[in-house]
Amino acid sequence: MFAVPAVLVGALALLLPSALLAAEDAPQLHLIDHPVALLTLAVFIVAYVVVMAEEFLHLRKSKPVVLAAGAIWAMLAWVSAQQGAPHAAEQALRHAFLDFAELMLFLLVAMTYINALTERQAFEALRAWLIRKGFGLRTLFWMTGALAFVISPVADNLTTALLMCAVVLAVGGDNHRFVMLACINIVVAANAGGAFSPFGDITTLMVWQKGLIGFFGFFALFIPALVNWLVPAILMHFAVPDLKPVMSSAAVPMKRGARRIAVLFLLTIATAVSFHQFLHLPPVIGMLTGLAYLQFFGFFLRQTHTRWNHRYRDRANEVGDMLPFDVFAPVARAEWDTLLFFYGVVLCVAGLGYVGYLSLVSDVMYLQWGATAANIGVGLISAVVDNIPVMFAVLSMSPDMSHTQWLLVTLTAGVGGSLLSIGSAAGVGLMGQARGRYTFFGHLKWTPAIALGYFASIWVHLLING
């Protein structure tokens, strides 16, 4: 009598973060009709509501989901023991935790490189160069969008969006109309750019590490992703003021080693791909090997720091490179709240999968609706809920889909968040950075144009990849 209607479960479970596969080898218990099943769902929903209220409560989003994960698995372990399978929950939990650990270490290495480049002022130098060139507002609109589209496949979309937004704010000044349109363009471009690269977003990384799409297979989404950005950008172009701002002469030099760190980052990506493609090892092993490249280079910078500063004292003062490079400083600046949030949602949804909710969702969406409609719906849902939990839910359900459909859900989950400003980390980040100038309702005004790009990209994907 405690069974939840399948449609309701489908609507709720996709609003949850989901864990990668809930215990394929664990004993299958019948928990869906147990009172604890509804209690675990309620705990997760409450935790996620608190997450969504982070802006008002000023409570970091990792805290409620980490607590919910512990509470959910404690309840499931107790119920499993009552049903004569005391180790079933342990097996399921270990499986989910191993998946999380692989992804967490992968992301940690990527974050470390991005933070190292930030510390070496590589991104600041790029921002200053764009400002110095004195481009017109319409040219800058297209340049920041194009750079966001190109950079986000390597760096995460939030870092890319914040960098481009800094350029827009520095040049746009009090021109609120330009700042609004440019920020919308950056969000759409950053999310679209991340959709065709295994490194562009956590969702694509998850699909790649599960082996559902090969590394080079993601590039089949390049043209659909480009269409997703270009359609709304072309429509917004005519609304951008045709003005030329005052040029700034300020230059920001990069610190010593910035270019070499960028090369090492590309080498690290190549190592991860090679380990996975040719040696059939998890990509995270290649990334951790690449972290050693940065550690050795950091050791070289530290050992030669005093001699270099003495020889090039004026340049050291100019770039502010008075302290030796410390490779653990970028590690410390990693987004630990994001990583812990990731841990919480993976384990929470692993618990929901253990109960049996995700099987119900899969039946409703992928058997009754059909794969194409379900995958389009996944993108629409990701406009309200972060795409990471939505994609985790799909991976946990593991529907039987063709390669074209896995590419489709990767595309829609990646770009669907652009429909609303709260649908992606890039949008939320820019609302904080350009507070008062880039707003929810300002973005909402252009949602029809973004939606046109969303459906156009789906049509193009099915046309060329279907």
Image: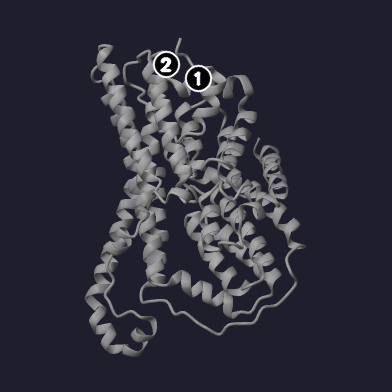
Q: Which residue sits at x=41%, y=46%?
A: 61
Residue 279 in view (yes/no): no
Which residue position holds label 1? Answer: 360
Figure colour scheme: one colour
Q: Which residue sits at x=36%, y=73%?
A: 257
Compare residues 150 and 161 and report the one nearer the observer: 161
- Apparent side of residue 302 relative to residue 318 in the rendered image (left or right): left
Q: Which residue sits at x=59%, y=62%?
A: 436
- Apparent side of residue 139 relative to residue 119 in the rendered image (left or right): right
**10 Å crowding of disc 1: few (<14), some (14-19), many (20+):** many
Residue farthest along the right direction in this orientation = 238
Above/below status of 172 relative to 115: below
- Apparent side of residue 48 relative to residue 379 in the rendered image (left or right): left
The amino acid pointed to by label 1 is: Leu
Rendered location of residue 86, percent (x, y): 23, 18
The numbered dot on residue 32 is 2
> Which image quarter is the C terminus in?
top right
Compare residues 448 and 143 and report the one nearer the observer: 448
Lower sequence index among marks 1 and 2: 2
Rendered location of residue 47, percent (x, y): 41, 36
Q: Which residue sits at x=29%, y=89%?
A: 311
